[in-house]
Image: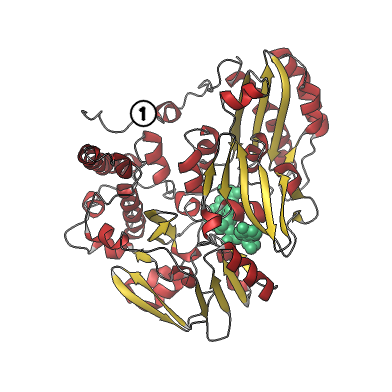
Amino acid sequence: MQSWFTFQLDGEECRVKSEDTHKSLALYLSNLDPCFAHYAEHDPWKRSRLVILGSLEDDCHRFRVVDSGLVLLPMLAGKQIWTAQGIQHAEPDHPAQLALQGSHFECSEERLQALRTLMFEGYYRPDLRRQGQINDQFDAIITRTANVPMIREAAAQVFASTEQLRHEAALQAEKTGQESTVWTGRKDIFGDRFTRSLFQLKAQTAEHYVDESKKRFFRPSNLVELLKLKREYPDARIIAGGTHLGMNIKNVSIPNLISVEDVRELSKLIKTEESWEIGAATPLTRVAEQIGRECPQITKILRRFATRPIRNRATLGGYLATARGTGQFSPLLFALNARVILLSENGERDAPISQFYDRNSGTIITPGEVIRSIIIPRHNHMTLADRGISSRLCDTYTSGRRRTLTEPYVSAAFAFELRDRTVAKAWIAYSGIDDIPLRVREAEEFITGKPWKESTVFETLPVLKESVTVKAGSENAGEAEYKMQLVGTLFQKFYYQHPKPDKVLPEHLTATSEFAKLDEPFFDALPD
Ligand SMILES: Cc1cc2nc3c(=O)[nH]c(=O)nc-3n(C[C@H](O)[C@H](O)[C@H](O)COP(=O)(O)OP(=O)(O)OC[C@H]3O[C@@H](n4cnc5c(N)ncnc54)[C@H](O)[C@@H]3O)c2cc1C
């Protein structure tokens, strides 16, 4: 057990000794140098302090923008951090820095620093090609005073130049049959000082750190070590992305923290003909990156989840374990018929997601257990045909005060498996209604066996109304009534967007051009 560790800060090695295991990177930086003093005032909702984290994820080197106030220092052992100041003063000028010169963005210096990190991450993202992704990239900038069209325009220029670079590198790599390494970001096509040092990072080995007050932070690298540590320290608390724990840790003292971030088996995604198995320590951004193409509903709902810096850290396991009654992802996991795998020294058990949540204790996780993975069935033509299903309609919705960084009122997801035009199986799920997300079995049973048509939807509405009760909470009576209305209107919206069984993709009923353009590239087509 070591009382020190190192990480790279703006290209220099930084040795950390005897610092509290609960200390955030933001607090550490604020004491390190006067130019970082403002990192001390951190609030993830209003004043996030963004930095770039460079690490090796599975077998991919990646830069991710993260909120330094939610990253605990020992999480950084062996990793790299670039601050906005480090990017700003790098020589030669970084394209993200050049793009943000001038005063036409109508932002404070603090906001420009956040923009610099977001632009930097976007510059290196191998998947950033569509209009909608630019919006997501900057969703942490929620101020209405910033000149958002200018930001978007500057970003589109920077990201289009990367696309050109990637296109040329892919043409070169094609000669040796390695173009996929370019498109997946496994090859360093930039060769600048940032990526050169990023690509030197090696797979993490286990790191164990103890601070001056004898609090310990363990970072095992595999499941065997993780379970051994859980046995040795039964009081230990698991930490994954830290977006929940990191926010609340200031007020508590946890003697033993076990990070699952680098547990190999928990960061893997295994794809078979029938399903995806997603390791519990996979951050939400990666979940969308890896299965969002085949399952666009996941991309859709995660676009409305917190902001990119939070999604880059918050893991699927951490999301499930916190069991938020308003979490917007759970209804979709119900509709996709996901299963949760729990692991302890006594072995594994699995539960359908609808049985994973528990009204009294939040979830069914027992003290010796960790979430190992989540299994999501792949509902493609082949797997459906095997079960005699002709089509599966599935979609998800969320309603809140604004697009991101808000507590949703109600989220919903619906899935209908049809045999010809008759409902063979139904999933109707909501969150924001009760302490835990819920599935409305009465309505599902009512609709099963009925034809998929408008009159059936109307007949189901009273059943929904009868079966769902909005839990009286802090909200006023008007808000509870509004939530109750959403239960019915979101269901109707689903029907009108998916009226025909053979048309699986939703109709665009909204007038929002943003949605219509989401899938369009932001650069002109490149020649082959
Ligand atoms: C600014 C902000 C905005 C947010 N917006 C949203 C939002 O829009 N919607 C929403 O639903 N949530 C939102 N959240 C909450 C966020 O989703 C959760 O904090 C996150 O999902 C937790 O994941 P994590 O990996 O960071 O968990 P951590 O903070 O690391 O851990 C949370 C809890 O889960 C336990 N845990 C973690 N992994 C495992 C595992 N594998 N097995 C067993 N237990 C485990 C930990 O012991 C801990 O008790 C927001 C949070 C912030 C800070």
The residue located at (60%, 56%) in the rendering is 318
Total label count? 1
**Residue under pointer 1:** 520
Residue closest to the eye, 412 or 341: 341
Question: Residue 277 lies in what quarter of the image?
Answer: top right
Identify whether 121 is placed above or below 148: below
Classify mark 1: helix, strand or loop: loop
Q: Is residue 106 visible?
A: no
Is 393 left or right of 180, judged from the image as shown? right
Q: Quadrant of the C terminus?
A: top left
* Percent x, y of residue 5: 43, 78
Instruction: For ligand 1, give the image quadrant.
Output: bottom right
Question: Residue 113 lies in what quarter of the image?
Answer: bottom left
Amino acid at the residue labelled 1: Glu
Is 288 left or right of 320, judged from the image as shown? left
| Residue furthest out toward the bottom | 212
Is 507 left or right of 198, judged from the image as shown? right
